[in-house]
Image (cartoon, grey):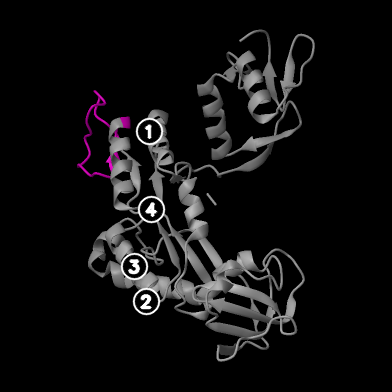
């Protein structure tokens, strides 16, 4: 889990609005069958008895298992022979069923439900946003998704829906929200203003980017989402501001490219595969910007600079292959001083 805020995600509690929601905690508790946890200090309120328990880590299934739930936490997991159900606790017979950890939706949008035009749909149906997202949240929970990371949507309606889910008045997964997506727009020639209509979530300068991130932080987002950024200083302004507040940044910056995101490609001269696609191109651009590699004139080859060799070895443990006169490393060529 993609900082201080990320640790809060692990500690966050989940309202026991459904049996399925309770199994979010199994991802932790099932690591040791029959172990008692701090949650058992609270009174046990529910027992799931008789099912096959799958721990989610590849361990052998536990047959005829018992899961004790205390409020919104897993208190104990074990076999029927080792875990006693306290007197008077509600029991649910799950014999013949499989019990497994709740699933995470790590990149989703409650406001996107298969519509034909994802750009127009949120605005065309803004008045129905709460009801649409509530229906999507319920569907996700009933499908076994107990935690949902929404990477872009109407924040006020999302906050309201999350409060209703947390209070138990509506069914749904635990929600982590990004709110409105930050986008870079084309600035005017003087780079001091934009030709595009003014929108607080559209940024054209590092200053605008920092201000936009601070506004989102003040509104209580759990993460920041960016899309379509191409100027590194602006993106750095976003990430540094978010990271200072303990928030991560989710980026779709490479997804608009026609080329594949990442693929294996055989180098014609070296006869060795290298990373190709949008990810490889973005990595090369970053290495060039850092001065770790430099292009050779009138060729597609690049050389590793002296600085790049030091940084690659010191930061990543990659030691470029060295030889007499020139050195090669995975198809990248190094000749002489940088």
Q: Are marks 2 and 4 in contact (CB under 8 Å)?
A: no
* Circle 3 residue: 163
Numbered range of the magenta stretch = 186-206
- Which residue is pictured at 27% across the width and 60% down the height? 156
Query: How far separated are the C-alphas under marks 3 and 4?
Result: 15 Å
Which residue is identified by label 1? Answer: 237
Q: Which residue is under mark 2? A: 170
Query: Which tag, 1 or 4, sits closer to the chain's start?
Result: 4
Position of residue 160 relative to residue 77, above or below, is above
- Which disc number belongs to residue 305? none
Which residue lies at the image location 70% right of the left edge and 77% below the top edge? 78
Residue 204 is one of the magenta-drawn residues? yes
Q: Secondary structure at mark 4?
A: loop
Q: Are marks 3 and 4 in contact (CB under 8 Å)?
A: no
User: Residue 144, image x and y in percent?
Assistant: 54, 73
Residue wearing tag 4: 178
């Amino acid at each position: 889990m993609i900082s201080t805020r990320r640790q809060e995600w692990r500690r966050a509690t989940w309202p026991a609005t459904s049996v399925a929601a309770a199994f979010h905690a199994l991802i932790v508790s099932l690591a040791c069958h029959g172990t008692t946890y701090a949650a058992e200090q609270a009174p046990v309120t529910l027992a799931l008895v008789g099912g096959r328990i799958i721990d989610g880590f590849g361990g052998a299934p536990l047959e005829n298992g018992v899961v004790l739930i205390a409020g919104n936490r897993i208190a104990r997991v074990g076999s029927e022979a080792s875990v006693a159900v306290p007197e008077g606790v509600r029991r649910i017979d799950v014999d013949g069923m499989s019990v497994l950890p709740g699933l995470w939706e790590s990149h989703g949008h409650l406001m996107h439900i298969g519509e034909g035009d994802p750009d127009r749909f949120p605005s065309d149906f803004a008045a129905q946003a709460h009801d649409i997202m509530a229906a999507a949240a319920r569907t996700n929970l009933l499908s076994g998704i107990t935690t949902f990371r929404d990477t872009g949507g109407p924040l006020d309606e999302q906050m309201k829906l999350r409060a209703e889910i947390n209070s138990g008045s509506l069914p749904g997964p635990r929600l982590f929200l990004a709110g409105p997506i930050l986008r870079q727009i084309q600035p005017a020639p003087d780079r001091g203003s934009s030709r595009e209509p003014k929108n607080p979530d559209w940024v054209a300068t590092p200053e605008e980017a920092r201000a936009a991130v601070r506004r989102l932080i003040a509104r209580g987002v759990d993460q920041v989402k960016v899309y379509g950024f191409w100027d590194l200083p602006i993106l750095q302004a976003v990430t540094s501001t978010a990271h200072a507040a303990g928030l991560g940044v989710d980026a779709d910056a490479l997804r608009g490219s026609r080329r594949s995101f990442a693929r294996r490609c055989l180098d014609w001269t070296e006869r060795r595969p290298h990373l190709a696609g949008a990810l490889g191109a973005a990595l090369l651009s970053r290495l060039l910007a850092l001065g770790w590699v430099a292009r050779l004139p009138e060729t597609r080859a690049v050389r590793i600079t002296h600085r790049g060799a030091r940084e690659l070895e010191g930061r990543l443990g990659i030691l470029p292959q060295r030889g007499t006169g020139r050195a090669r490393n995975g198809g990248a060529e190094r000749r002489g001083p940088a």
